[in-house]
Amino acid sequence: MRHVNPTNALVACIFALAMAGCSQKSGTPDTSAASAGAAADVATREQEIAAKEQELAAREAALKQEEEANAQAKAEAEAQAAAKLAEEQAKRDAAAAAAAAAASAAAARPAAKPAKTASTASTSKAPAAPPTPIVVPAGTQIGVVLSANVNTKHVVVGTPVQGTLASDLVINGRRAAKAGAAVQGTVTNSVSGSNKIGGVPSLSLRFDSLVAADGSTKTINAPYSQQGVSETGKDTAKIVGGTAAGAIIGHQVSDKNGAVVGGLLGAGAGAVAAKKTGGEVKLTAGSVLTVTTQSSFEVKP
């Protein structure tokens, strides 16, 4: 559409009105009525011209605003398109760089070796460190259940003694031996009350081996001792009778009679009887003896 310059249009209109006025002056007489009508026409036309000018100005402003909006929208669209193109180009560049890096790494790697079989893989692994042994320290208490009776009247030094562990032997939460494990020992001292008039019976044992939780036999050193009660009074009574026994035990016998009592103590049927019926230390089967180890030993877990 062709735009009309409002200034030129205004000049044309004024010129036309002037020509019309000149024509009226030359062709008709000048009257007051004609002059008034002409003035009214001029005013009307001026108003029309002003209205046209405003309309044209408004149209021009609207066109200018529309052009500016179109230009701004076009610039924004071009900027978005440029940004999208830049983003796509960056993606392509990154993909190309990654592909080049992968190709370079593949070229640098040596040829792939055949996959290991399950057996080969398992044997190639470094063996796990073996667990540390269980150390049973000296001073550890052990409960031993006797398997048979032990009596000082019958046993001698060297007689074997057998038993079992009364409960699990646990060190720092780790079991070194199971309940019921075999425990072996020997008699190291045996004094019978029947072998000596007025003697004190005593018994000593030493447990020297224990079957550990791993099945091995461990050397241990765990002694046990028990002493009986002296039966001097009973032995004396058997020899000389109740009254004389009281005198002898209380040292109330005179030197004169002491020789007689000494003779009685040295021989005679009463002395023989006393010697054969003295006291003993008796440990019955099933008894639990609490012993303490005197040295340490190790057990594999």
Image: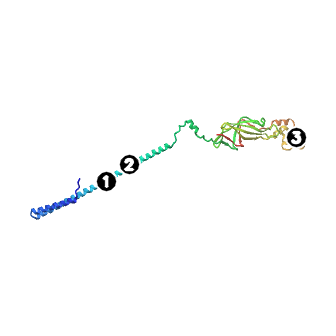
Counting residues from the start of the chain, the first of labels 3 and 2 encountered is 2
Percent across and percent down for residue 95 are 43, 45
Q: How crowded is mark 2: few (under 14 residues within 10 Å), some or many (20 or more)?
A: few
| Location of residue 62 in the rendering, given as x and y in whole percent from the top left corner | 27, 55
Image-based side of 14 in relation to 128, left or right: left
Type of amino acid at the residue the image marks with label 3: Gly
Relative to residue 273, is residue 125 drawn left or right? left
Going by the numbered disc 1, the residue's amino acid type is Ala
Q: Circle 3 — which element?
A: helix
Q: Position of residue 167 (x, y in %)?
A: 66, 39
Q: Is mark 1 on a helix, strand or loop?
A: helix
State how far apart marks 1 and 2 are (Cα): 21 Å
**Which is in the foreground here, disc 1 or disc 3?**
1
The residue at 38%/48% (across/down) is 85
Mark 1 and mark 2 lie on one chain; the one further toward the N terminus is 1
What residue is shown at x 25% (from left), y 56% (from top)?
Answer: 60
Q: Residues within 10 Å of mark 3 (few under 14, many from 20)?
A: few
Secondary structure at numbered mark 2? helix
Q: In terms of depth relative to the viewer, which is nearer, 73 or 187?
A: 73
The residue identified by callout 3 is 262
Mark 2 residue type: Leu
- Residue of label 2: 85
Q: In which quarter of the image is residue 99?
A: top left
Q: Which residue lies furthest to the right in this view?
A: 256
> Which one is closest to the eye, mark 1 or mark 2?
2
Task: Return the mark for residue 71.
Answer: 1
Between residue 214 and residue 173, name the one nearer to us: 214
Comes first in the chain, label 1 or label 3: 1
Instruction: State the residue in front, 59 or 221.
Output: 59
